[in-house]
Structure formats: C-alpha cells, structure tokens
Amino acid sequence: MPDLSAALGMSTGIGTITIGDVLWFAGIVAVGVIIAKVVATNVKRALTERLPKNERELLAKVVYYIIILWAIAVALPYLNFDLSGLLVAGGIAGLVIGFASQSVVSNLVSGLFLMFEHPIKIGDNINVAGITGSVEDIRILSTIVKTYDGIYTRIPNEKVFTSNITNYVNNAARRFEYKIRIRYKDDADEAIRLAREVIATHPFALKNPAPMIYVDSLGDNGINLIARIWAPARNWWEVRTILLWKIIKRLEENGIIVPYPQRTVWLADEERTSGSGAGKSLEE
C-alpha cells in the first residue's frame, strides 16, 4: 500500500498534478461517459413512438454530450484547473447566446415538455392557437398541423405549450346534438320513438352512453326536440353528417313534418265603414 500511495502521489511533471489526480479525472469522465450512454439509450427508447428517428438521434446526442461536459466540469478540479475564469467567460457567452436564441431555446424546452406531457399525438384532431386540423408531425422546435382545408401550418412549440389545446379525439367518445322541430299537431312521443329507431340502426351510434331525445321547448312554429348522440371520436363527423337527414326522412315517411316558419298577418277590412273593427287574417 505504501508503494501504491507513493505511485499515486508521484508528479506528472505538469505543475502539481499527480498520477492520482489524473486517475481521478479519468475515472470521473469514464463514469460520466457510461451514464451518458445509458441515459441517451433510454431517451431514444422512450421517444420511439413520439418522435421521428432523426430527431430522436439528435436529442439523444444533445443529452449525451451535456452529461459528458458535466462530468468533465466535475473532474477538472482534480487537475488543479481553476474553473472561475472559464465560468465567467462561459457565463458571458451564455448570456449573449441566450439573448440571441431565446425563442429557439424556449421552443426547444416547450417541445420537451410536450413530449413528456403528451397532450397531443400525431393524427389527433386539435384546435390550438386558433388553428384547427390534424397533427401531422411533432418536432423538437415546432408542431405541424394540417388544417381541414389541406393547408400545412407550422406552430412554434412555445405557442402550442402556452395555448389552450382542444383535443377532439383524446376521449374515446364524443357527443353531438341535433335540434329537430315538429308541428304542434304531430305526436312528439312517436317522433322520439322513430328517431331512436334510426339512431339504433347506425353501427357507430353508441348505446353506452345512450342517446337522449326529449322535448326541449315550445317554439313559435312548432315543438322543438333535442337529440344528443354519442359516437366514437374518430367517427364522430361521419355519424353526425349522416344521421340527421335519415331521422328527418323517417319522420316524414310517417307523416311527421318539419314545419316551415309561419306568420299570422291581420289586415284591416276594406269595408270597415261601420266602425265595427272587423277584420280578416292571412296565414303564411
């Protein structure tokens, strides 16, 4: 042991640095490299389904080199290296780079938060920052949304992260609503029964939660019915666009008609000479 201690305490000829200091430096850096490899591998594995391959590789390399630089910074004092000057220079450079790339860093950090929070994923129908469409890609700095008009829009991740996100398909089911008007002389109970029959025939109209159909109000031109129907979120639009016309057709086939707006107009009697105030009405 004395020989080993003496060997480790031997000078390397570079200032006061000993062989032991060099071994400590090398050991810390080696451990840092091992940790960096493990973390980078796990980062790539965790983001396999969330990011394209190129962006996964880039992010893993950034994490890898950050850990190695951290290990070197921890190990440098063993070589009697004064970090104060480097820290001052690095701090000044960091401030300059930070101001110059503030938006880039903000988008990068927001992109990382989006990846781990996972409020949206590729293929989701969303509304974010006033833009509605389907998510085509989620990148480190931006999110690509294809609007329903077929227009590709790039949204910076900072804007995505700080905006209210409406995800139309994150829940398995989604509800829509119809307002159906029938005449006062029609049977509301029969109209509700017929509408239920039509809804039950559609394969994507969910039975649980069950549809709700009821009399909502008595309007100026007829009885107002409300139909609330649940469908799988991915098929919501298809079901919504088909069922209403089928319900209307079934009602009309059974003599239940959607009324046109009506108005009663009272006209003064042209022969109103006796002052009786008699009149006649015209209905539209």
Image: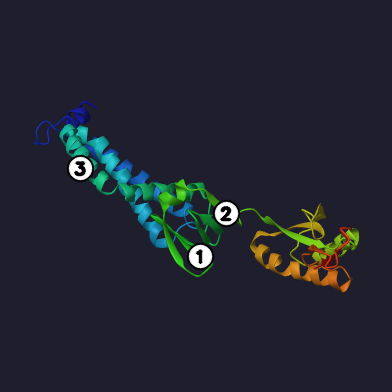
Which quadrant of the figure contains the N terminus? top left
- Counting other residues with Cα less than 10 Å from the Cα at mark 3, is it few (<14), some (14-19), or many (20 or more)? few
Q: What x and y, as percent, mark residue 190? A: 90, 62
The dot on residue 113 is none
- Counting other residues with Cα less than 10 Å from the Cα at mark 1, is it few (<14), some (14-19), or many (20 or more)? some
Return the disc, 3 or 2, that comes first in the chain's sequence: 3
The dot on residue 93 is 3
Up the image or down, 55 lies above or below 18; here it is below
Q: Residue flagged by tag 2: what amino acid is it?
A: Asn
Up the image or down, 182 lies above or below 62; here it is below
Q: Which residue is mark 2?
A: 167
Inspect this view and state whether residue 213 appears: yes
- Residue at 45% across, 66% down: 152
Q: Residue flagged by tag 3: what amino acid is it?
A: Ala
Secondary structure type for disc 1: strand
Secondary structure type for disc 2: strand
Secondary structure type for disc 3: helix
Find the distance from the CA under tag 2 to the CA under tag 1.
14 Å
Q: Quadrant of residue 67?
A: top left
- Residue at 30% across, 43% down: 30
Return the disc, 3 or 1, that comes first in the chain's sequence: 3
Q: Residue flagged by tag 1: what amino acid is it?
A: Thr
Horizontally, is 211 left or right of 255 in the view? Answer: left
Q: Residue furthest front?
A: 273
Q: Which residue is mark 1?
A: 147
Find the distance from the CA under tag 3 to the CA under tag 1.
41 Å
Does the residue at mark 2 contact the one at mark 1 (Cβ under 8 Å)?
no
